[in-house]
Image (cartoon, rainbow, N blue to C red):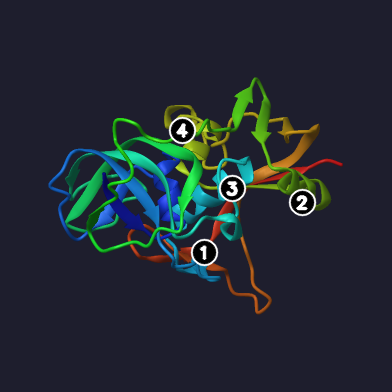
C-alpha cells in the first residue's frame, strides 16, 4: 500500500483529521488511501516559536481539549494510520496550508488502534506490501471534544492537567482560532461599538474526564503578553508577518 513519511506532529495531525492539507513541492499524481508514517525526526523544543501563530493555536487548543497528545507522547518510526488524498491545489485557504505549489487535500482520516512500529521511512511515496488496503488493521476516527455555548455558559472540555492549571491560575486561555472566534464573537452586524464584540458569557464550566467545575466570569477579552523587559511577546502569522502574541482569556471568580 502506498505510504507517505511525515514528520511529527504533522503525521498524527493528518490521521487525526485535524490537518486537512499536506504541503509538498511535488504533486501526488494519485487519488485514494495512503498510509501515514511518522518519521524519526523529533519535535524540536522551540517548535511553538517556529510555528505560524494560527497553526500553533490550533494545536495547543486540541492538546488542552484532550484531542491531541503532548509532544513527548508522540510515536516515531511507525505507521500510525491512513488518510485519503483527494487532489491538490495551490490556493487553499485552510489554516494548515502554506504557499507551496502542491497543497494536497486530505480527508477520511483514521488512526490505527495500535501503531505499526519499527518502520523506516523513505522519500516520496513508498510501498508497504505487508499492509493490504482491503484488509487494514483496526483503526478509529478521532471524536473531537470541543467547547460550546449553553446559553450564557461556556463549556470547555479539558485534560486533567489543563483543568488543574486553570483552577490554580484562575485564568482560562483559549488560542485564537476561527472556531473560537465564531463561537465567542457576535456577528459583525450585531457589534454596536469597538468594545461590543463578544457574546454574553457569564459562567464557564470546565469538564475533565473526572471532574466538572463551574466558575463565574469576572472578565473576558483578547490579551497580549508583556516580557520582563516590557516588550510584547511576538509571533508569526500566516502571512509571515510579526505580530503581538495574544489569547482569548477568561478571568474566573474564585
Vertical side of 108 occupied by 44: above or below: below
**Of marks 3 and 2, the one in the foreground:** 3
Asked whether disc 4 touches disc 3, contact meaning CB atoms under 8 Å apart, the reply is no
Q: Nearer the viewer, mark 4 or mark 2?
A: 4
Crowd around label 1: few <14 · some 14–19 · many ≥20 (10 Å) = some
2 sits left or right of 80 in the view: left
Residue topped by disc 2? 165
Question: Residue at the top extreme?
Answer: 151
Q: Position of residue 237 (x, y in %)?
A: 40, 60
Q: Quadrant of residue 77?
A: bottom left
Q: Of helix, strand and loop, which one carries label 1?
A: helix
Label 4 vs 3, first from the N-terminus: 3
For the residue pair 244 and 113, the one nearer the viewer reads as 113
Residues marked 3 and 2 touching at CB (< 8 Å): no
Q: Which residue, given by chain and number where applicable, does mark 3 sit on? A: 63
Disc 3 or 1, which lies upstream in sequence?
1
Q: In screen coordinates, is 100 left or right of 170?
A: left
Which percent across, then down, holds residue 182? 48, 33
**Residue receiving disc 4:** 138
Residue at which label 1 appears: 48
Amino acid at each position: 500500500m502506498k505510504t507517505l513519511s511525515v514528520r511529527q506532529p504533522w503525521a498524527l495531525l493528518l490521521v487525526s483529521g485535524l490537518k486537512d492539507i499536506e504541503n509538498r513541492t511535488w504533486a501526488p499524481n494519485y487519488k485514494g488511501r495512503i498510509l501515514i508514517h511518522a518519521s524519526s525526526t523529533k519535535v524540536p523544543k522551540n517548535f511553538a516559536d517556529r510555528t505560524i501563530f494560527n497553526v500553533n493555536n490550533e494545536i495547543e487548543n486540541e492538546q488542552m481539549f484532550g484531542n491531541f497528545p503532548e509532544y513527548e507522547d508522540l510515536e516515531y518510526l511507525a505507521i500510525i494510520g491512513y488518510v485519503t488524498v483527494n487532489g491538490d491545489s495551490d490556493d487553499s485557504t485552510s489554516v494548515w496550508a502554506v504557499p507551496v505549489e502542491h497543497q494536497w487535500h486530505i480527508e477520511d482520516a483514521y488512526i490505527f488502534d495500535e501503531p505499526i512500529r519499527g518502520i523506516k521511512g523513505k522519500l516520496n511515496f513508498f510501498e508497504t506490501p505487508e499492509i493490504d488496503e482491503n484488509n487494514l488493521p483496526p483503526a478509529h476516527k478521532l471524536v473531537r471534544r470541543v467547547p460550546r455555548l449553553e446559553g450564557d455558559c461556556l463549556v470547555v472540555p479539558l485534560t486533567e492537567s489543563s483543568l488543574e492549571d486553570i483552577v490554580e491560575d484562575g485564568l482560562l486561555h483559549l488560542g485564537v482560532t476561527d472556531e473560537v472566534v465564531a463561537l465567542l464573537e457576535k456577528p459583525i452586524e450585531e457589534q454596536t461599538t469597538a468594545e461590543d464584540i463578544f457574546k454574553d458569557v457569564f459562567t464557564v464550566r470546565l469538564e475533565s474526564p473526572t471532574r466538572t467545575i463551574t466558575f463565574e466570569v469576572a472578565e473576558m477579552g483578547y490579551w497580549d503578553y508583556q516580557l520582563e523587559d516590557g516588550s510584547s511577546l511576538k509571533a508569526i502569522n500566516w502571512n509571515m508577518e510579526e505580530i503581538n502574541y495574544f489569547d482569548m482569556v477568561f478571568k474566573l471568580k474564585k
